[in-house]
Image (cartoon, helix red, strand yellow):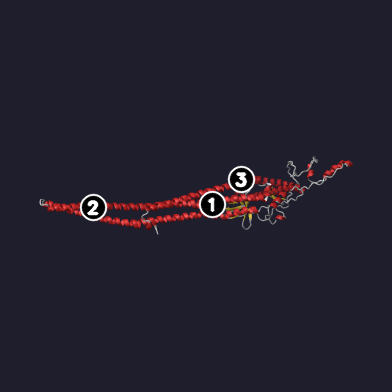
Amino acid sequence: MDWGTELWDQYDIIEKHTQSGLELVEKYVKFVKERTEIEQNYAKQLRNLSKKYNLKRSTKDEPECRLSSYQSFLDILNEMNDYAGQRELIAENMMMNICIDLTKYLQELKQERKTYLMEAKKAQQSLECTYKHLDSSKKRFEREWREAERSALYAERTDQDINATKADVEKAKQQAHMRAHVAEECKNDYAAQLQKFNKEQNQFYFGDMPVIFNKMQDLDERRVQKLAQGYFLFSDTEKHVMPIIGKCLEGITKAGTNVNERNDSMVVIEQNKSGFERPGDVEFEDYSQGINRASSESSLGTPKGPLELLGKNKSKNFWLFSKKSKATVTEDFGHLPPEQRRKRLQQKLDEICKELQKEVDQSEALGKMKDVYEKNPQMGDPASLASQISQTSQNIERLRGELNKYETWLAEAGGRGETFRYKTHTFNNNGAHDIHGPDGAHSDESTPDPSQAIYAEFDDDFEDEELTAPIGTCTAMYNFPGASEGTISMQEGEVLAVVEEDKGDGWTRVRRNNGDEGYIPTSYVTLNLNK
């Protein structure tokens, strides 16, 4: 069944129905837009909430950050932030796939409907024009036929009138004949117009209008189908991110599972254990027996631990809940209890080692850069690196001194420095490599072995350490031969893993899939670092 057959006489109904359908599409688009605004506001509020309760950068080193309950809370905040991102994705996809797409399609339907209505109006105007011609020819035929009848009647009366002359009778007959001829022409014209009108009317009702109505039916059905797709997308857009949202919720559940009250208690012990022994019993001093005062005083030194910290105020009792005075912070952390002092010294050693490793890498990079400049003068002036080389050497010497100092303090505190042995490359005034050992003495090696690692050499415990994880990728914009020591060649368009970021010297450390590592000019590549 189609509109052209069943609704041939319902033009107004069809026009109203199609208009109402287009308005429904507009209404649905507005509905989805408001839904996306709700999603965006919801996501924004979730992000602000996560940001509000998340740790600031300055507090991430606080002791409680090591607690599993604290870490789980941070995990929940991160998962909520990811969850907010999925809500934003829902809003974005709904806007792109539903609102924008339906709005564009709606404009096309409006234009198409307007074209069909104009065709219908044009066909109707043509039929009305033909009908006017038909009516005009009909009225003319009626008028001329009556005139012909009157002329014929007049001619008959004149012929019967005995007083009429022969000329009058002849004239009356000629007039009647002329009128009859005109009436006959009008009749033929009316018949032709009637035939033309009937033909056009038949074409209008059985040809033109049914075609237009069927086109509008097709338009309306396509509108309904497109709208139904919009309804599906409204659900599918959210279903698409449900697996990721589910992972976010699973992450929150896992955060609760990761809380370990026993481990948290052990962390508190580890962070706050002083290392002191419990106070011993205070000996009885019998003044009635005349005990030597000196020996009596020395008996106070028997208890080991907190009482020794009382100093001159030995008469004051040691209480667990007494308010502790704020100790003066010293460089060797002597103000801390033994256990905490050892931990802080070890932590300081680790920081110095990291900084020293950074300077060693910087020194190596400058050496490689100088070698490249000497072999390729067009890339830069080797003399321009002298100040940086000198500063790096000074930094290495300073850090080496600090490292020895803190290792001594750690040994005094009863700890073992778990630091790595290193071998640094410094530069003399000529830019040549000088190799120094941990004690700063000059090595017997006059020339560095290219196969020997320039980086710090770790203890045996670290020999099997895995390769440094990449921090991003880079794509080569130009060819680079990599002829100098420590550099690596690359071809234009080649993608490499970034192992170490440019430290300001213009070189980036990269790795191939086969494990080959080396430095390349930072300006030769496009970087894509992980955030």
Q: Residues within 10 Å of mark 3 (few under 14, many from 20)?
A: few
Along the polypeptide, which appears first: circle 1 or circle 3?
A: 3
Mark 2 or mark 1, earlier in chain? 1
**Is disc 2 surrounded by few (<14), some (14 to 19) or many (20+) residues within 10 Å?**
some
Query: Which of the pair 36/139 is nearer the observer?
Result: 139
Nearer-N-terminus badge (2/3): 3
Q: Which residue is drawn at 30% across and 52% down?
A: 129
Whole-percent x and y of residue 77?
61, 49
Left or right: where 56 falls relative to 181: right
Mark 3 = which residue? 52
Q: What residue type is labelled 3?
A: Lys
Q: Give coordinates of residue 322: x percent, y percent.
A: 75, 42
Distance in Å between CA atoms under marks 2 and 3: 95 Å
User: Is residue 491 shown left or right of residue 355?
Assistant: left
Q: Which amino acid does label 1 sit on?
A: Ile
Q: Which of 103 and 411 is in front in this view?
A: 103
Label 3 SS:
helix
